[in-house]
Structure formats: structure tokens, C-alpha cells
Image (tube, rainbow, N blue to C red):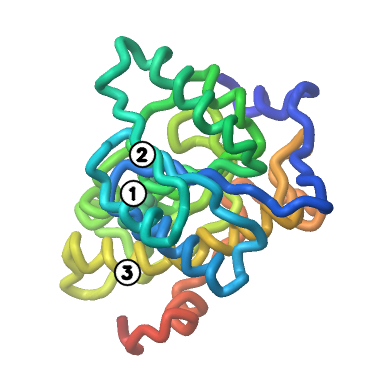
């Protein structure tokens, strides 16, 4: 797929109906700490909408318990029970659409999606990825960043396209890699940033401020650069009340 394929005429700008409460469906596979950040934001009236369902392809995902505890519809849809990726994605589309979402959020959803699935939710589906995209697409991002000796790492919230971890970025947050940083310590700092920017990106999408349409990704109508908006290490550390020198 070329870089410009998704800026097609068929992709309508996503603009939720302002008269209705915005509806969010979250897809998870595991712990669900990003889901928890979204639930917390909703409970503090900072999400701009309501999480109407959480769906996991792993029936024992801890995130399903987080959803139930928050009174949110929690659905286990085990991919192993489907004979093909396409059959699973077809079932997933049906479950998602029953909940009539304005926005679908992939929050640690560890599945490669079929083009049909991506097309169905194009322009209204976000993913959280633990790197400063386009660097370190794919898995084990923290270990790879450390092995390369980078000074800066981080996370991205991006719109989902057919290219794995390749959709246009909306928001990023950076972290400075400290002396003696381990994979675990780096992961934990990056996750804190994920929990910071994910609810913000969701809110801006639901408010119609952040859009992925025919002009690419725009914020308040202004096109964003390929790497979206970036929160610096200093700003994120201040927001998170991290000890100085981290
Ligand atoms: C996060 O690190 C996210 O970047 C990646 O998967 C992880 C999910 O963590 N896509 P959690 O389930 O939200 O705790």
C-alpha cells in the first residue's frame, strides 16, 4: 500500500453527531492498563464519551475484569474458536457494530487485522504503540531501542490503517533513556506516558478535534506532520510528577 492510498475519496472525515453521547469500544488482549486509564478518565468526566464495551480475544485477560468492575459490558471472543483470521474478524465486526461505536480503540489488542476489518473502521480506530513511530514498529520495542542505544524512546497513538503500526500518528510522548535503564524500567516509564496520552487522543477524537480524513490527520482543521503532536520528555515528566533526573 502506498503512503497516499488511505487519503482516498471514499474516506469520509470522521465527525461524530454532536447531539449524542459518543460511544467507545475498546479491544484488548491482556492486562488492560490503558483500558484502565480510559475508564479512569471517563469516571472523571475527562473522556468526552462512554466506553460501551470491552472485547478481548483472550478470555482470561485481566482487562475484562477491569471492565466488569467498572460496570462495562465485557465480551470474550476467543480467536482460537474461529477457523480463520477472516472468520474471527467477521465475528468481531458484528460484536463491535452491535455497540454502535463512534470510535474503536485498540489498547493492547495483539492481533493482526484483516484489510476488511481495517476498512470497516478506517478513520475511527486508534491504536497505542510503545515507540516513537515510525521507529520500532512491531514487537519488543523497548529491548530493541535499548540495544540500539537510543537516547529517546516513547509511545504513539495512531490511526489504524492496513500497514501494521504504520498508520498516521496523532499523538506521541517521549521519554529520555536514563543511565542504566533496563527493559522493565523503560517499559514502565513508557506505559505511564501511554496512560497520559491515550485518553487525550480519545477525547480529541470524540470531540471531532482530531480527525483522519481526506486531508490526512488534522487537529482543529490543521494538518499534522507525519509524527503527529509530540509531548516532550520534560512535559510528560512534569505531568506525571516523575522524579527529576529520570
Ligand atoms: C501497551 O504497552 C501498548 O503500547 C501495546 O500493548 C500494551 C498493552 O498494555 N500496544 P495494557 O494491556 O494496556 O496494560
Crowding at mark 1 (Cα within 10 Å: few <14, some 14-19, many 20+): many
Identify the element where label 2 is drawn: strand
| Contact check, label 2 and label 3, Cβ < 8 Å | no
Across and down, in percent, residue 132 comes to 44, 53
Q: Which residue is mark 2?
A: 56
Q: Looking at the picture, does residue 103 appear above or below residue 44? A: above
Which is nearer the eye, 46 or 173?
46
Across and down, in percent, residue 233 comes to 45, 73
Q: CA distance from mark 1 to mark 3?
A: 24 Å
Identify the element where label 3 is drawn: helix
Q: Quadrant of the N terminus?
A: top right
| Contact check, label 1 and label 2, Cβ < 8 Å | yes
Crowding at mark 3 (Cα within 10 Å: few <14, some 14-19, many 20+): many
Q: Which residue is mark 3?
A: 189
Q: Earlier in the sequence, mark 2 or mark 3?
A: 2
Q: Earlier in the sequence, mark 1 or mark 2?
A: 2
Amino acid at each position: 500500500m502506498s503512503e497516499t492510498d488511505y487519503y482516498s475519496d471514499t474516506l469520509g472525515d470522521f465527525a461524530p453527531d454532536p447531539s449524542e453521547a459518543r460511544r467507545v469500544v475498546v479491544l484488548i488482549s491482556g492486562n488492560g492498563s490503558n483500558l484502565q486509564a480510559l475508564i479512569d478518565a471517563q469516571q472523571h468526566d475527562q473522556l468526552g464519551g462512554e466506553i460501551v464495551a470491552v472485547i478481548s480475544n483472550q478470555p482470561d485477560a485481566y482487562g475484562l475484569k477491569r471492565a466488569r468492575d467498572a460496570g462495562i459490558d465485557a465480551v470474550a471472543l476467543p480467536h482460537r474458536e474461529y477457523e480463520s483470521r477472516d472468520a474471527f474478524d467477521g465475528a468481531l465486526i458484528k460484536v463491535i457494530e452491535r455497540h454502535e461505536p463512534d470510535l474503536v480503540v485498540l489498547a493492547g489488542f495483539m492481533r493482526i487485522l484483516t484489510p476488511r476489518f481495517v476498512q470497516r473502521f478506517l478513520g475511527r480506530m486508534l491504536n497505542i504503540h510503545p515507540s516513537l513511530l515510525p521507529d520500532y514498529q512491531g514487537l519488543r520495542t523497548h529491548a530493541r531501542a535499548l540495544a540500539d542505544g537510543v537516547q529517546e524512546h516513547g509511545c504513539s497513538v495512531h490511526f489504524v490503517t492496513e500497514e501494521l503500526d504504520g498508520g498516521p500518528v496523532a499523538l506521541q510522548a517521549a521519554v529520555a533513556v536514563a543511565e542504566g535503564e533496563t527493559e522493565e524500567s523503560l517499559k514502565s516509564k513508557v506505559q505511564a506516558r501511554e496512560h497520559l496520552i491515550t485518553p487525550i487522543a480519545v477525547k480529541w477524537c470524540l470531540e471531532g478535534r482530531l480527525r483522519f480524513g481526506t486531508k490526512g490527520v488534522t487537529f482543529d482543521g490543521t494538518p499534522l506532520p507525519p509524527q503527529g503532536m509530540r509531548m516532550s520528555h520534560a512535559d510528560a515528566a512534569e505531568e506525571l510528577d516523575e522524579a527529576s533526573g529520570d
